[in-house]
Image (cartoon, rainbow, N blue to C red):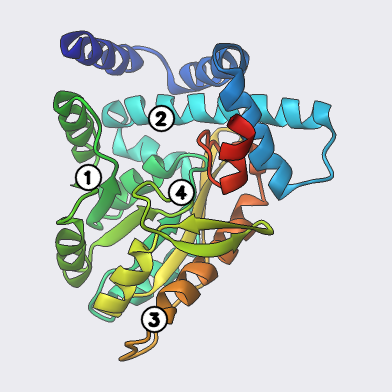
């Protein structure tokens, strides 16, 4: 089973280099938009619920169309992931733009690296590759540990090929991330889903849920700001928008600061997601009511 999974991944990555990115991206987007909802109606329903939270005025038909586009965005994300290692650096730069990059530069000038907090939206892998390959800025990202281990290692090598240092979620993750911030790495954390189950309660699109406390803890430990960021598809381009920095309070021991920082991040991410909710490919339950509806 492990061998079959690795073979499939290697074939997908190897095949991706043989097809022009514009063709491959269009195919991946259309195929996922058609096949995704048919393979898993449960995930399609979940995606519709998430989009309805962002824009409750959409009709059922509009939500179904938006969910199909969400699957399409997810398909395009995977095309980007497999294709990035084989793209010339000049093309990584040509197909990408950054609004607010100066905020990253300004934080690094203080002697520490910023903590980029992102939603599952668009092509965040492209932004990391652009930072690492085009701007020569070291990037460290936390990723969920996959099973089997061989698959996790393969994805780690894939990301390393375009300049991303991978830290797996786990007990020692904070040690690695703290060192990365102090070495002026740009640290990237997905922050719109509480994978570990240790998050803090926040208001997210008008409903209470738990989101990761890790970004707040890292900011308090290092003094580094949190920079809410999202990477959107705009035609053939990928466009990153970097929000204003959210700084931790100096010398604060108040644990309530974890909740305040996490809520501030959540509010900023909600504003970014609302720009293009159909590109928010969060397919898992994310609120307590999602799990109730699945019963």
Q: Is mark 2 on a helix, strand or loop?
A: helix
Give the residue drawn at x 85%, y 34%. 59
Q: Which mark, by number, is residue 193?
A: 4
Q: Mark 3 and 4 residues: CB-CB less than 8 Å, in contact?
A: no
Q: Is mark 4 on a helix, strand or loop?
A: loop
Asked whether the residues under the numbered discs 2 and 3 touch, taking CB atoms below 8 Å apart as contact, a structural biologist would say: no
- In the image, residue 206 above or below residue 48: below
Name the foreground residue: 193 vs 153.
Answer: 193
The numbered disc on residue 84 is none
Q: Separation of disc 3 and disc 1 at Cα?
A: 28 Å
Disc 2 target residue: 80
Do the residues under discs 4 and 2 have CB atoms within 8 angstroms? no
Q: Mark 3 points at which residue?
A: 248
Residue indicated by mark 1: 163
Q: Nearer the viewer, mark 4 or mark 2?
A: 4
Mark found first going from the N terminus, 3 or 4: 4
- Lower sequence index among marks 2 and 3: 2
Which residue corresponds to the image point at 39% horizontal and 60% vertical from the top-left? 116
**Would you say the residues marked 3 and 1 are in contact, meaning their CB atoms lie under 8 Å apart?**
no
Q: Which residue is drawn at the image coordinates 61% and 38% (left, top)?
A: 292
């Amino acid at each position: 089973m492990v061998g079959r999974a690795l073979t499939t991944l290697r074939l997908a990555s190897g095949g991706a280099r043989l097809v022009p990115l514009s063709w491959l991206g269009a195919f991946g987007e259309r195929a996922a938009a058609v096949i995704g909802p048919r393979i898993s109606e449960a995930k399609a329903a979940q995606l519709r619920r998430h989009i309805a939270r962002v824009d409750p005025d959409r009709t059922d038909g509009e939500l179904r169309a938006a969910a199909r586009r969400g699957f399409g965005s997810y398909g395009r994300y995977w095309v980007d992931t497999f294709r990035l290692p084989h793209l010339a650096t000049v093309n990584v730069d040509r197909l990408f733009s950054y609004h607010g990059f100066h905020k990253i530069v300004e934080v690094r000038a203080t002697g520490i690296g910023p903590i980029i907090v992102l939603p599952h939206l668009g092509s965040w892998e492209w932004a990391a590759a652009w930072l690492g390959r085009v701007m020569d800025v070291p990037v460290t990202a936390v990723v969920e540990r996959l099973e089997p281990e061989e698959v996790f290692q393969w994805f780690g090598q894939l990301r390393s090929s375009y300049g991303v240092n991978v830290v797996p979620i786990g007990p020692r993750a904070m040690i690695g991330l703290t060192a990365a911030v102090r070495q002026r790495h740009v640290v990237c954390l997905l922050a719109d889903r509480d994978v570990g189950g240790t998050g803090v309660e926040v208001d997210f699109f008008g409903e209470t849920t738990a989101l990761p406390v890790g970004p707040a803890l890292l900011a308090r430990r290092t003094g580094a700001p949190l920079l809410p960021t999202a990477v959107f598809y705009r035609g053939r381009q990928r466009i990153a928008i970097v929000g204003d920095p959210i700084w931790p309070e100096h010398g604060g021991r108040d644990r309530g600061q974890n909740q305040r920082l996490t809520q501030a991040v959540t509010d900023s991410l909600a504003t970014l997601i609302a720009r293009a909710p159909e590109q928010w490919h969060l397919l898992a339950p994310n609120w307590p009511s999602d799990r109730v509806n699945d019963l």
